[in-house]
Image (spheres, helix red, strand yellow):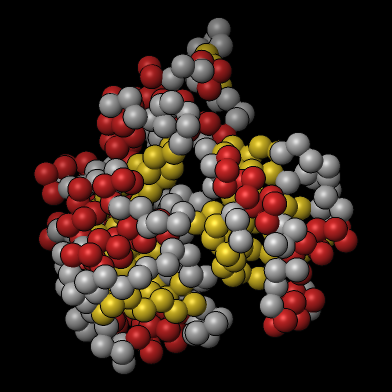
Amino acid sequence: MARIDAFLKLGTQQGCSDVHLAVGVPPMLRMHGDLMPIKFRELRGVELEGYITEILTHAQNQLFAKGGDLDFSYVSTEGGRFRVNVYRKDTGVGATFRAIPAEVPTLEKLALPPIVAKLCDFHQGMVLVTGSTGTGKSTTLAAMIDHLNQTRRLNIISLEDPIEFVHPSKNSQVIQRELGTHIPSFAEGVRAAMREDPDVILVGELRDAETISMAMTAAETGHLVLGTLHTTSAVKTIDRVIDALPVEEREQTKSFLAQSLLAVVTQVLVKTADGHGRKAICEVLMMTKAIAKLIQTEQTHQIPTQLQMGRDLGMQLLDQALLAAITARSVDPDDAYTYALEKRAFQKYVTDTSMLPKVDLTGSTTVPTSNSAA
């Protein structure tokens, strides 16, 4: 057993989402969104480098020795499966291990909006799942792939960096390919997938113009494309796609979005009411003629109004979803407040009054310095 496995085993036993190892501090666990140190001494440089190099392949060791960061999946003998990022910093090496559950969670278990399951019924077009790092995008996509795998007979090709959840083929055939191991880039992976008779292509991250362009081509030519972007709202997602491609392709990109984008699901993870977990809260955009027209006429700033009025189509703003979760007592209202955009509507639910804006005797409002006011 690799020495690092002891920390990973402790992390999984505690139910953490991530294990952080860095020189000069003790190992830390991400518990329900908060970083907590474990009772252990500060890690020394030579010690931690030894732990890490022990689990690397020869090729990975060579790349890391040259100063490169590493992204890979690792199966601990006792701690389970992890997505790993290894890096160097000013005081030495560091690593983050993201725990991957042994079983793929279902859409029902994740309590995602019902419309997410309906998105899996489409045969062509693009669905984007977005959010900042660590908001569960990969988990949502894994649940969607599992739903497709169980309910339809398809050829599903998943391009990942690295492979996280392992999908045994059920009613569908699931082919999982890893960046750096099986494909040189996401763009090349999509290009190759289109020659492999796919029904569904999952693109782990639409991180550059070439990948976005190839994914758009796949969606336009009769495939269902699922992908992720690091954007924090439906409007920012659409703007990012348009801005990512060359100016001369702007009209073509807007036309693609209006015709082939099916939906954008943007999510955050909010602490549950009991404080023992986190729940995905989603903003949902479904493409309609009205939204398509706003995209083509470059009036994306008006899209939130369409989301607010589109509840019967499964659409919702993030603030609407947060308020509904607070009312249902399924999330911590204080944590929900930190994610709300229009915070005034949430103030009456906040239990920690130090989070609220302060009003001085002159009537002016001051904002708390914590990130809860962001």
Q: Is residue 67 above or below residue 192?
A: above
Q: Is residue 188 above or below residue 4?
A: below
Q: Is residue 241 above or below residue 323?
A: below
In-image side of 252 versus 291 (left or right): right
Residue 136, position as x, y percentages in the image: 43, 52
Q: Is residue 183 visible?
A: yes
In-image side of 259 versus 356 (left or right): left
Observer-nearest of 150 and 71:
150
In-image side of 45 versus 153 (left or right): right
The quarter of the image holding the N terminus is bottom right
View extreme (bottom): residue: 195
Q: Is residue 307 above or below residue 209?
A: above
- Residue drawn at (61%, 46%) of the image: 11
Residue 12, position as x, y percentages in the image: 57, 47
Residue 342, position as x, y percentages in the image: 38, 33
- Residue drawn at (35%, 53%) of the image: 105
- Residue drawn at (24%, 54%) of the image: 116
Q: Is residue 250 visible?
A: no
